[in-house]
């Protein structure tokens, strides 16, 4: 959470930092700030306030040219959303200016132990870092003052530090929170996400934990905390500028929903050479050698994992347990003798999942991360990694990453099975099926007519039940309609008490074996006044079914059933004029536990 960007070089730092912050705003949007060097007064100016990056663009409108700057967009953890708690923060004399992503768990203890003489302006843990650096700089050179500070910090950090006495350097450091250094013809950009580097850097180096960086206009050096120089492992940035923009769409979410057929086709072409799978055989062997697969994930990725469990069990007869990452991390269940862990994550940075990975790795178990971000911490730290190829997902509500996760889990399940299914072909069929109804206007009218209450239910059985969980998360997180996903047969065991005249109940029906049961459950709620809607596949279609989707392979129905539910969420939020790409209280990439 939070986004940070810094630039030093022979270009306009304000432009580069603001552009970067705009691209990273989906990571947190409570407040935004930046610091630029004021050549006239030879000081670093700090601009910050609660609100969006657009406000920061206004407040920095008249700033003078600076070739060095750092910026931050915040998702509040310590302290209210206000100007004082916004980043950058500075030390007491204003010599050191810093932006920080992460959480310093022992900040109160550090304050008591080292900083009783200091005056604090904010309630943040971050300000402690600035004050510590200043305190240590009274007896140590700057580099050692920063390294001494870093060694005292418990928690997580990605940090950028400016020193007013040396405006030709940016210092940076990383532990647990992501930080990437980019090199381009005009300078060095350092950011918490590759997206901020696109257009300014050709190559990047993803920093390891406990790295300390000194960047100048044309050089960057990386050290460990013993001040030993580390090699740079530069890789080409392969994100297009167009991937970071909305193009013809009103919102990133709508763009990303429309990209789903292309994502499925890209996955099919990246995972197969003709019809031969390109998945590392060691991954398949490691899963086969295990006696149980454990899928760990959070939120939407957990919902994709639930589908993955069904696919593994149905296709490959491999038993799978699925756990919510934040629970697994601290309430470890009894494990089987030879477990294999699959971590499903769009961002590859989810802190709850990282906590799981650290614990699992300590026990020498093998792990596979399935993620959209190859540079991410979880991609780098797991034994194996598989890429989602969904392209940057910018809307906070995940859509195309979910579809990609289900597709990659399906490929893995088919690889593990002895069944003779041409999964590449089936993914192509699913992509074409999605294409056929993406532009259906019917959903807009349905949303206006049906979603008139403050609550809503999705019901389904089998795979449809799990799609219903994802559908309800999508609807609630962007339209703020209180939505629950239920196993259709479970409503009558209590929840049906909530059904009253007009309550929207949306049934997902794709499995011919159990469609009759779900339809009966729908009748039960209709009898109590529910305003119902059916989303079905052609395989189970009946007269008066409102939304009918083309047939796909029976185990891949989640790939298409989810799409109208994403659009329903989108239109419900649009109807209410909510900020679709940046719903309240949320942030993409949840890097705090
Ligand atoms: C909801 C959503 C979240 C994420 C969750 C895990 O639309 O995006 O529920 O799925 O925060 O994030 P990742 O997949 O990055 O680990």
Image (cartoon, rainbow, N blue to C red):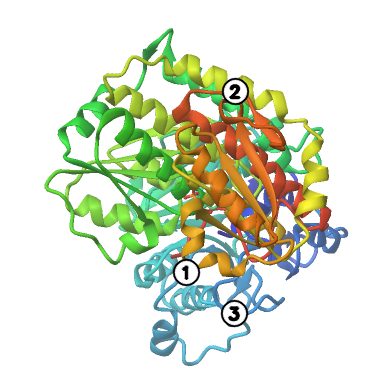
Which comes before the other along the chain, label 3 or label 2? 3
Specify the quadrant of the image occupied by residue 530.
Answer: bottom right
Q: Is residue 268 left or right of residue 210?
A: right
Instruction: Look at 81% across and 62% down and name the residue there.
Output: 55
Q: Is residue 68 left or right of residue 337?
A: right
User: Label 2, on which residue?
Assistant: 431
- The single residue placed furthest to the bottom in the displayed view is 116
Name the image quarter holding the N terminus. Answer: bottom right
Are the residues at dot 1 and dot 2 in contact (C-beta closer than 8 Å)? no
Is 593 rendered above or below residue 304? below
Q: Where is residue 555 in the image (x, y as percent from the top left)?
A: 44, 29
User: Label 3, on which residue?
Assistant: 79
Q: Is mark 1 within 8 Å of ligand 1?
A: no
Instruction: Look at 77% across and 49% down and name the residue there.
Output: 447
Is 221 rendered above or below residue 315? below
Cα distance in 3D space between marks 1 and 2 = 41 Å
Are the residues at dot 1 and dot 3 in contact (C-beta closer than 8 Å)? no
Name the image quarter holding the C terminus. Answer: bottom left
Q: In this view, does 572 lie to the left or right of 176?
A: right
Q: Is mark 1 on a helix, strand or loop?
A: loop
Q: Is residue 270 left or right of residue 504?
A: left
Which comes before the other along the chain, label 1 or label 3? 3
User: Label 1, on which residue?
Assistant: 103
Q: Which of marks 3 and 2 is in front?
A: 2
Q: Could you say which disc has been placed on residue 449 in the image?
A: none
Q: Is mark 2 on a helix, strand or loop?
A: helix
């Amino acid at each position: 959470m939070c986004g940070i960007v810094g630039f030093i070089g022979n270009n306009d730092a304000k432009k580069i930092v603001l552009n970067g912050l705009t691209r990273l705003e989906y990571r947190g949007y409570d407040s935004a700030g930046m610091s630029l060097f004021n050549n006239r007064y030879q000081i670093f100016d700090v601009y910050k306030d609660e609100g969006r990056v657009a406000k920061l663009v206004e407040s920095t409108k008249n700033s003078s040219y600076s070739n060095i700057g750092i910026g931050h967009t915040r998702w509040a953890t310590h302290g209210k959303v206000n100007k004082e708690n916004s980043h950058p923060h500075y030390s007491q004399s204003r010599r050191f200016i810093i932006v920080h992503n992460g959480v310093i768990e022992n900040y109160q203890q550090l304050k008591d132990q080292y900083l009783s003489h200091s005056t604090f302006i904010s309630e943040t843990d971050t300000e402690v870092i600035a004050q510590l650096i200043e305190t240590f700089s009274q007896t140590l050179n700057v580099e050692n003052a920063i390294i001494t500070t870093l060694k005292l910090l418990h928690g997580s950090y990605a940090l950028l530090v400016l020193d007013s006495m040396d405006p030709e350097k940016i210092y940076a450091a990383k532990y647990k929170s992501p930080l990437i250094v980019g090199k381009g013809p005009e300078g060095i950009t350092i950011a918490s996400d590759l997206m901020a580097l696109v257009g300014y850097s050709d190559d990047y180096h993803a920093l390891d934990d406990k790295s300390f960086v000194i960047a100048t206009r044309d050089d960057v050096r990386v050290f460990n905390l013993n001040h030993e120089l580390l090699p740079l492992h530069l890789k080409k940035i392969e994100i297009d500028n167009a991937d970071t923009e909305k193009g013809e769409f009103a919102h990133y979410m709508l763009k990303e929903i429309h990209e789903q057929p292309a994502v499925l086709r890209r996955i099919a072409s990246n995972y197969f050479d003709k019809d031969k799978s390109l998945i590392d055989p060691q991954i398949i062997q490691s899963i086969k050698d295990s006696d149980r697969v454990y899928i760990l994930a959070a939120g939407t990725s957990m919902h994709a994992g639930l589908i993955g469990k069904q696919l593994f069990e149905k296709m490959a007869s491999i038993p799978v347990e699925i756990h919510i990452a934040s629970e697994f991390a601290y309430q470890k269940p009894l494990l089987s003798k030879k477990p294999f862990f699959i971590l499903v994550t769009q961002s590859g940075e989810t802190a709850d999942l990282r906590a799981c990975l650290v614990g699992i790795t300590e026990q020498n178990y093998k792990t596979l991360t399935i993620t959209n971000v190859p540079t991410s911490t979880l991609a780098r730290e797991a034994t194996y990694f598989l890429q989602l190829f969904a392209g940057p997902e910018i809307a906070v509500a995940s859509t195309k990453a979910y579809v990609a996760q289900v597709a990659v889990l399906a490929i893995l399940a088919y690889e593990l099975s002895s069944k003779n299914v041409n999964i590449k072909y089936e993914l192509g069929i699913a992509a074409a099926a999605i294409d056929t109804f993406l532009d259906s206007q019917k959903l807009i009218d349905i949303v206006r007519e049906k979603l008139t209450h403050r609550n809503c239910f999705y019901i389904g059985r089998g795979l449809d039940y799990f799609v219903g969980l994802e559908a309800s998360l999508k609807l609630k997180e962007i339209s703020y309609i209180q939505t629950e996903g239920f196993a259709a047969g479970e409503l009558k065991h209590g929840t049906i008490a909530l059904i009253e005249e007009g309550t929207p109940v949306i049934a997902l029906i794709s499995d011919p074996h159990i469609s009759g049961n779900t339809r009966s459950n729908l009748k039960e709620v209709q009898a109590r006044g529910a305003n119902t809607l059916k989303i079905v596949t052609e395989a189970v279609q009946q007269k008066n079914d409102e939304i009918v989707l083309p047939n796909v392979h029976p185990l891949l129905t989640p790939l298409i059933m989810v799409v109208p539910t994403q659009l329903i969420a989108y239109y419900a939020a649009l109807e209410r004029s909510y900020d679709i790409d940046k719903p309240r209280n949320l942030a993409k990439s949840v890097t705090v536990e």
